[in-house]
Image: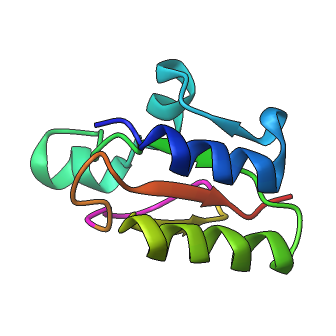
């Protein structure tokens, strides 16, 4: 499921167009979870609706407010490695890449 156009635009206004994406190849890169492959013979979790790279806590706070407004699940991502991923229950969830 895609994000509502208004929600995506609001998030893009916060981080800038170069720091948000819905490109399938990038979304698939973020949803590979090796523990799922080991235990469930499926290395992918649910594909996120978008991936954002916020620059600071102010942007994170603003994104969380948008998520609350539109009922969007969000998950922080920083290490690039997860043992199991069950946090995104559907494709209306987003990932916040905090490595930056």
| Figure coloring | rainbow
Q: Is residue 13 left or right of residue 11?
A: right
Residue 68, image x, y percentages: 46, 76
Q: Which residue is depicted at the point 42% across and 43% down?
A: 4
Q: Is residue 45 above or below residue 55?
A: above
- Asked if residue 82 is among those painted magenta in the image, a careful observer would answer yes
Q: Which quarter of the rendered picture does the C terminus lie within? A: bottom right
Say how many tags the image has. 0
Q: Is residue 79 left or right of residue 75?
A: right
* Residue 96 position by quadrant: bottom right
* Residue 60 position by quadrant: bottom right
Residue 77, image x, y percentages: 59, 63
Q: Which residue is depicted at the point 13% across and 40% down?
A: 41
Q: Which residue is depicted at the point 53% across and 51% down?
A: 7
Residue 31, image x, y percentages: 42, 43
- Residue bounds of the magenta highlight: 80-86
Of residue 60 and residue 43, the one placed in the foreground of this image is 60
Of residue 51 and residue 1, the one placed in the foreground of this image is 1
Q: Is residue 39 above or below residue 22?
A: below
Task: Identify the residue at the far front of this view.
Answer: 6
- Asked if residue 43 is among those painted magenta in the image, a careful observer would answer no
Q: Which residue is depicted at the point 49% across and 38% down?
A: 5
Q: Is residue 72 above or below residue 1?
A: below
């Amino acid at each position: 499921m895609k994000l509502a156009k208004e929600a995506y635009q609001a998030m893009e206004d916060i981080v800038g167009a170069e720091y948000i994406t819905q490109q399938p190849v990038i979304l698939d890169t973020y949803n590979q979870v090796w523990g799922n492959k080991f235990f469930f013979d499926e290395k992918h979790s649910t594909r996120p609706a978008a991936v954002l790279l916020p620059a600071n806590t102010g942007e994170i706070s603003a994104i969380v407010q948008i998520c609350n407004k539109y009922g969007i699940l969000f998950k922080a991502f920083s290490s690039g490695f997860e043992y199991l991923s069950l946090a995104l229950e559907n494709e209306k969830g987003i990932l916040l890449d905090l490595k930056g």
